[in-house]
Amino acid sequence: MAASHRAAAPGTGRSLARSRPRYGETVIKAILLLAALVSVATTIGIVAALLEPTIEFFGAVTFGEFFGSTSWGPLFKDPTFGVWPLIVATLEITLIAIVVAVPLGLAAAIYLSEYATPRVRKIFKPVLEVLAGVPTVVFGFFALTFVTPLLRDLFPFLDLEAKNALGAGLLVGVMIIPIVASLSEDAMAAVPNGLREGSFALGASKMLTSVRVVVPAAFSGIVAAIILAVSRAAGETMIVAIAGGFKSVFTLYPGNEMATMAAFIAQAGSGDVSVGTIGYKTIFAVGSLLFLMTFAMNYASARMVQKYREVYD
Amino acid sequence: MTLLSTPRSAVELAGKGRPLKEHLFRIALLCSLAIALLFLAMLIFYVVEQGWPRLNSMLWENQPSIRRPETSGIQSGILGTLWIIALTAVMALPTGILAAIYLEEYADKTKWYNRLIELNISNLAAVPSIVYGILGLGIIARWMQFGFTIMTGAMTISLLVLPIVIISAREAIRAVPPSIREGSLALGATQWQTIYRQVLPAAVPGIATGSILALSRAIGEAAPFLMLGAATMVRFNPEGVWSSFSVLPLQIYTFITRPQPEYAVLAAAAIVVLLVILLLMNSVAIWLRNRYQKRW
């Protein structure tokens, strides 16, 4: 209850607090709290689902083998459990995606926030929303049947395989452009006009003001947006499963087919791996690793916004 | 120049020194935005062109087939998606909106548990969807023994979109100015009466927009269903919440993974159906926002 309810009415000395408790209001508040707690239960559920099979997995496979070798084939007859090929593929595709999305998304955000008239913004923002709403299977299909063949025609010397990290990474990049753009734009829109006017008054041009004043002022929000986009890219499943492939070879060359962590989970989870086998538990172990990685990034992003946000006014 | 020059003329003044660089910068920014748009246009054009030969009534009248790609349809997928979305709307929207009301109207931000809930929701919003698939598989399908049914799929997807619903509903509620609440409280309304009769009606357009966008995210999801045993070419329509099922995005995925070229055409046609549904939902959401959103 807000504090104002408890205050004494001026001049009377009588408390303004309710004379009798309203049970209905309390019940409603409890129901609302319960709804909010569903989200906490979800996190607990995710951890619970991951934990037990992961512990069992590390009972059979040592930490040293999981993180210390570079051969990944948990579903083979002679299974190997070196997770590095999956991690390297995930990082590589994420890197390609970021190289695509950060410049384009940031430029789009600067344009929308600093240059566009309200009418232009009203047209462009919904289009970005539509791009954000395109299902990832669609991007995957486009990467596999259009972008990769195009790249192979244009750059035959790259020696691209039919499924490859480059095509998948490019499309993951396109997928996260709207995240970078819209969150960065929010951060730039929060920069007070006084800063811009001060910059103009000192004779700075629009470009200088955008690049040297607005972007630095919104920096923490922009970094948070990028971290969130990285996390989304690292966990993206359908694009990499369709266009990146399932082969896990320890390689750095983006023209090769390579399986990310998410792609492995998708492949093993949709295949016929029997419950209780080591292959089945591997799904959960890789899932835990992916969850921990994205969780760390999301947390960093949330803290970034909370802690380093410059509060104006 | 008068002393009272507006920032606009100040810009023009400052721009005189290096007009070329300024122009190039502006053009580069516009190009970046244009690339994103062009890409979207190209993608839509490509799938329509590819799927055109199969965009006929066979698509929704027939069931998917492993042997006959040229007459295979997507009926079970369309119906499965509709079932999942309807159930998700029933489960996720009320829960999400109630949670948003709690966080905006009741929660004391200085209490640690409320801050935990908030941090938790922003974290969940960015958890990869395949991890939600693991949650559905481990907890809902196996531990709760709901099996690979529509119920399991809808519950999993509900949990997946819940953070999005909460975040967008909170924004809509926050946009209602405090003066409305204060006026209502001053007239003697209780807190719930204030919320139910004043705040919620004012926030409905925003909540509806956010809800539609969240559900459209649910329609396009395929990854969690991979974990929930819905990957096969289901040749029957779902009959109830305990029926096994397939969804449209997953059928598209299955078609893409088949080697015959006819399946690529079929996948493109199915993608067109999916995109039409999504574009319709997006347009309704944008229209709602433009039509009813109030600026206080």
Image: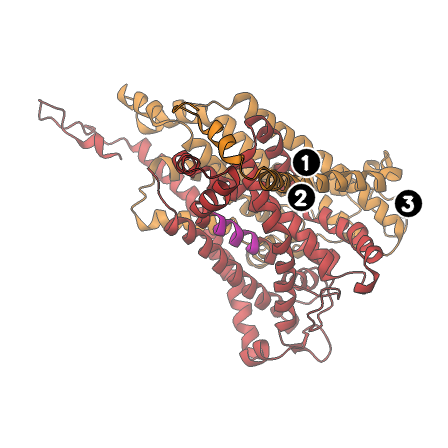
Q: Residues within 10 Å of mark 3 (few under 14, many from 20)?
A: some
Please state which amino acid type lies under the numbered disc 2.
Gly
Nearer to us in this view, A192 or A14: A192
Label 3 belongs to which residue?
B70
Mark 2: which secondary structure?
helix
The answer to whether the residues at label 2 and label 1 have Cβ atoms under 8 Å apart is yes
Judge whether residue A229 is colored magenta: yes
User: Of label 2 and label 3, which has the lower sequence position?
Assistant: 3
User: Of label 3 and label 1, which has the lower sequence position?
Assistant: 3
Please state which amino acid type lies under the numbered disc 1.
Leu
Are callouts 3 and 1 both on one chain?
yes
Q: Residue at x 69, y 46 (%)?
A: B243
Q: Residue at x 43, y 31 (%)?
A: B173
* Magenta part, dominant SS: helix
Mark closer to the observer (2, 3): 2
Colour used to depict chain A in the structure image: red
The total number of labels drawn is: 3
Q: Residues within 10 Å of mark 2 (few under 14, many from 20)?
A: many
Mark 3: which secondary structure?
loop
Which chain does the orange colour mark?
B
Colour convention:
by chain
Nearer to us in this view, A202 or B111: A202
Q: Is residue B229 visible?
A: no
Q: Chain of mark 3?
A: B
Label 1 belongs to which residue?
B278
- The numbered disc on residue B220 is 2
Relative side of B102 to B275, left or right: left
Nearer to us in this view, B210 or B175: B175
